[in-house]
Image (tube, rainbow, N blue to C red):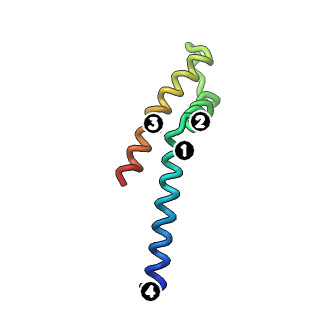
Amino acid sequence: MDFKSMLMEMAEEQAGKMQIQATNYIDSNEFSVMLATKINERINLPWINEEREQELFEKVTDVVCDMMVGFFQKK
């Protein structure tokens, strides 16, 4: 195996590990709540109180995160 092939193999292996780590983080409740909180800080729905807004955004981010994980797992 030549040097270029060895480097490419190592890079692909490392990219695979990073993808797994990123996918696991995106799939975590910690990430979903953090993302929902960031969205809630920037968007105000005046007809809904803050606690309900947070619940709503957490449900939305759960769906978005599940979609992102599915996208990464297909590749």
Q: CA distance from mark 3 to mark 2?
A: 14 Å
Q: Which mark is residue 30?
A: 2
Residue drawn at the location 46% of the way across and 75% of the way down: 8
Secondary element under disc 1, as helix, strand or loop, is helix
> How far across and how far down the image is residue 49, in percent?
60, 14
Residue drawn at the location 50% of the way across and 58% of the way down: 17
Q: Earlier in the sequence, mark 3 or mark 2?
A: 2
What type is the residue that disc 4 sits on? Asp
Q: Which mark is residue 25?
A: 1
What type is the residue that disc 1 sits on? Tyr
Tag 4–tag 2 contact (CB < 8 Å): no
The local crowd at label 2, few if under 14, some if 14 to 19, many if 20 or more residues have their Cα within 10 Å, is: few
What type is the residue that disc 3 sits on? Val
Q: Which mark is residue 59?
A: none
User: Which residue is tagged 4?
Assistant: 2
Q: CA distance from mark 2 to mark 1?
A: 8 Å
Q: Is residue 16 above or below residue 61?
A: below
